[in-house]
Image: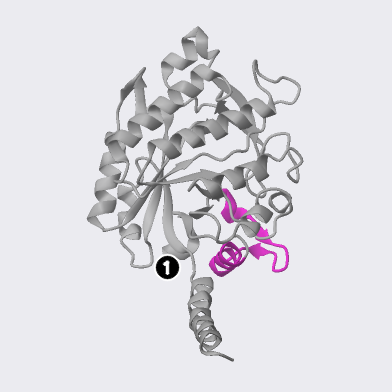
Amino acid sequence: MNRYQRLLVSLAALALPLQAAHAASAPENFLYTSSGNLTAAKATLSRPDIGGVQVVYNWKSLETAKGQYDFSAIEQDLAVAKSLNKKMFIQVQDRFFNPKARNIPEYMLTEPEYEGGLTPQFDNPGENKPVGSGWVAQQWNPAVRARYQALLKALAEKFDGQVYGINLPETSIDLDPKNDPKGFSCDAYFSAEMENLSFARKAFEKSLVVQYVNFWPCEWENDHNYMGRLFDFAAKNNVGLGGPDIVPNRKAQMKNSYPFFNKYKGKLTYVGLAVQEPTLTYKNPATKKPFTKEEFTAFAQDYLGANVIFWSTATPWLKK
């Protein structure tokens, strides 16, 4: 073995502990909460094992009239996070899981070019939950999409580099299969979501941009290549990905987003996954008990490659 070969062997030996340490690093713990609730969670956020927070803001609260924005809630929450030296993600919500939550700006509900702005959707989160209903913004309508992108632009101008990152909402929607809204198609929806993601990535030059993905309408096991195209785009364009629920080995996710997170481990800028209130209701089939912190974390780290877990403030271990 010559000197050059010995040098390569030595460098490889040095790299192994570093790789092992990287693989062994657990995801960072963040809180997950809604606008208006962060002050009440300040004591939990101040814990040394909590690195930051993700706060969800609905579209209506941020755009009070056409082109008029009120970001005071974000400013107040960001001040709380900075006072504790914690990081902060903002999530701009355009879909809602309550029949009374029509939380887009009022002008979009009435002006004709937006065609109502919202479409009914259905949802059944968690175990032992009744089927609920809610609304999703018609992002496939170019007029609606233009207003959402205007909001993203205004947010970037104010908060790029101030917030740690921005989350775009989950990709899944569940519309009435017998009554597709005007202009909707699965391809049109996919294209609209990808356009919003591309716009957000260009608008936010400093903060992380993370798209939540779990399912795509009309798709199962990537049979439309929506999932494949999203992950490929993310890997090539400095985009993070994540999801609203970590449920170890759950069949539906294992047929959709989870294998892609596994395939792209180490290839994505950032992976942020959540344990939200519905997620806490799922039970481990082996133990018949709710998944533990350790079980959530192990699956997020080992299979999904998570950098961070956003924990609901209702999570039991946070109460200890």
Look at the image and tell me whether residue 73 can be seen.
Answer: yes
Residue 204 x, y percent position in the rendering: 38, 40
Which residues lie in the magenta part? Answer: 278-302
Q: Residue furthest bottom?
A: 1
Kindly indicate the quadrant of the structure image that contains residue 51.
bottom left
Residue 79 location, x and y as percent? 24, 47
Front-most of residues 248 and 130: 248
Q: Which of the pair 266/44 is nearer the observer?
A: 266
| Residue carrying label 1 | 320
Residue 25 magenta-drawn?
Answer: no
Q: Disc 1 marks which amino acid? A: Lys
Residue 153 at x, y percent in the picture: 37, 30
Q: Quadrant of the N terminus?
A: bottom right
| Residue at 40%, 32% in the rendered image | 152
Indicate the secondary structure of the residue bearing disc 1.
loop
Q: At x 61% / y 63%, what residue is drawn?
A: 291
Percent x, y for residue 253? 68, 50
Quadrant into which the C terminus falls: bottom left
Check if residue 288 falls in the magenta segment: yes
Query: Outermost residue, front direction?
Result: 2
Q: Is residue 252 above or below residue 120?
A: below
Whether residue 215 can be seen here: no
In the image: residue 243, left or right of residue 225: left
| Viewer-nearest residue: 308 or 130 | 308
